[in-house]
Image: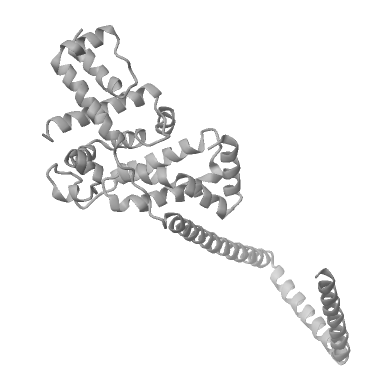
Amino acid sequence: MHAVNERELVERCRSGDDGAFQELIDQYKDLVFALIARTVQDSSRAEDLAQEVFLRIHRGLPYFRGEARLSTWIYRIVANVCVQEQARPRAAAPSVSLDDERVSAHVTPSAADRQFGDLELRDRLEKAIARLPANYRLLIAAHYLDGVLYEDLADALQLPLGTVKTQLFRAKQQLRRLLETDLK
Amino acid sequence: MFCDEALDAVEPIAAGELTPDGRIADHLATCPNCAAALDSAKRLEGMLRARPVPRPTAQFTARTIARVRRARWRTEQFLDVGFNVAMIAIVVAVVGGIWMLLHRSGLSVVSTDAMDLFSTGMMTMVRRVAPSLPLYGAATAVLATALVLWWWAERDAAL
């Protein structure tokens, strides 16, 4: 999204234009939802949390100074919501067994998966990702979405660019280790 | 070259962000462990790129807008109640303050006399005006009719 259009959209939202805010939701909903659904372990909470992100955006727009890009600010809100969700007390510990059949049930097989026999591996990948710490999960989720750059993540997480890259590589190392040991 | 150094480079190489230079390339070609790690990292990279992207439901925007409106309405209600309570508190404080002031300065007796004088004056005025009330009523009705006619004519002209 161009900076001028972005500023104009923000101004329209600030002036109370509901249509503009709807436009903003349509613009970012796929990204926000995908990030959250990939990061939180409870997939049934994803929509609720994505709505919470837009609610915070709506509340925060009057204070958005435009120093960062709108998308960066939105990533930051998503990161905060995910961290808070992680800190939320739950009835049961969020441990995921690698042999848990219920976890494998939510992965919908596609024809291509069946063709290449990847389904089991992908299922194990999802389980391994669920075992990563929340910040690593968020990095993995965001990095493999179209249009999300290292710079966006660094700005959103308020970390140096090098740290983001290092953390991402560590996350992948940990993931590989999980797939090679526990998942074999 | 130690394996540790090569293994640190495996992830960036698999992601296509680092081209192995001569030393690392040589090591990867000769060390089966590091070559296997690179192979595994490349497979993981492919799997991560092929991960399905979750999509929100078709009603997501409508539901979110409804939630935002509910939240805004609640905030407005809260502000309204807060404003009303504040206004009542201010009125009570002002009236209480004036009463305290009059009471302490002994002016409350004077103010009672002033109220008596005011109410007597009002009663006298009402008694004098009462015979002319039909006349005033008729004049007001004529004025109101004229205003309505003027508004109606203006509206037709605008259309």
Q: Which quarter of the image is occupied by the N terminus of chain B?
A: top left
Screen quadrant of the C terminus of chain B: bottom right
* B88 vs B38, nearest the viewer: B38
Residue A85 falls left or right of residue A77: left
Residue B157 at what x, y percent from top left?
85, 71
Q: In this view, does B2 lie above or below A180?
A: above
* Residue sitting farthest toward the front: A115
Of B15 and A47, nearer the camera is B15
Q: Can residue B128 be seen in this view?
A: no
Residue A116 quadrant:
top left
- The image position of residue B96, as x and y in percent, is 61, 66
Q: Which of A128 and A147 lies nearest the eye of the viewer?
A: A147
Q: Position of residue A25 (x, y in %)?
A: 48, 49
Q: In the figure, is residue B66 to the left or right of B19?
A: right
- Taking depth in this image into account, of B25 and A136 the one nearest to the observer is B25
- Judge from the rendering whether residue B67 lies leftward or rightward of residue B24; answer left or right: right
For residue B66, say whether it is visible: yes
What's the residue at 47%, 38% (across, down)? A71
Residue B106, position in %: x, y? 69, 67
